[in-house]
Image: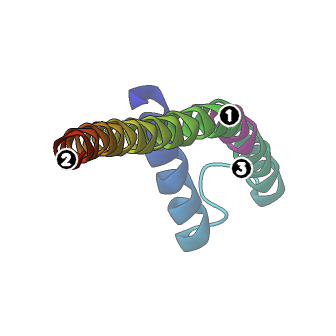
């Protein structure tokens, strides 16, 4: 990342120097071609990062969704377990009260 920042800073300075003094140090056309080539190379590099970054972002999003689903499944399982316990307690108390009434 440091290399990319350094490259971007250098190219930004070159672009500003081209805007302020287009004819200094180099032929204007040669300077423009050099800048155009450097911008092209910079875009190529950022596109390489984008592919990797988009894969990483997609993985992160999917992992987060998976965690959320697992959390919801756990909550649902807990509620089902609680409901089963309440139903089993109620049915056993009903059975006892039916035996007492007979």
Q: Is residue 59 left or right of residue 78?
A: right
Quadrant of the drawing holding the N terminus: top left
Q: CA distance from mark 2 to mark 1?
A: 78 Å
Q: CA distance from mark 1 to mark 3?
A: 15 Å
Q: Which mark is residue 97?
A: 2
Q: Is residue 83 left or right of residue 100?
A: right
Q: Is residue 59 left or right of residue 96?
A: right
Q: Nearer the viewer, mark 1 or mark 3?
A: 1
Crowd rating for badge 2 (residues with CA inside 10 Å; few <14, some 14–19, many 20+): few
Q: Nearer the viewer, mark 3 or mark 2?
A: 2
Give the magenta range. Answer: 43-49
* Closer-to-camera residue (78/19): 78
**Residue 52 colored magenta?**
no
Rendering colour mode: rainbow
At numbered mark 3, what does the secondary structure look like: helix, strand or loop? Answer: helix
* Marks 1,3: beta carbons within 8 A: no
Crowd rating for badge 3 (residues with CA inside 10 Å; few <14, some 14–19, many 20+): some
Name the residue beneath numbered marker 3. Answer: 35
Magenta stretch, main secondary structure, is helix
Residue drawn 64% across the image and 29% down it: 52
Q: First in sequence: mark 2 or mark 1? A: 1
């Amino acid at each position: 990342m440091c290399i990319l920042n350094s490259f971007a800073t250098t190219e930004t300075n070159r672009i500003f120097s081209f805007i302020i003094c287009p004819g200094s140090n180099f032929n204007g056309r040669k300077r423009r071609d050099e800048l155009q080539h450097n911008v092209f190379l910079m875009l190529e590099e950022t596109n390489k990062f984008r592919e990797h970054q988009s894969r990483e972002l997609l993985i992160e999003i999917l992992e987060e969704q998976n965690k959320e689903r697992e959390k919801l499944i756990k909550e649902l399982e807990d509620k089902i377990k609680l409901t089963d316990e309440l139903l089993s307690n109620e049915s056993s108390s009903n059975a006892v009260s039916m035996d007492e009434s007979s």
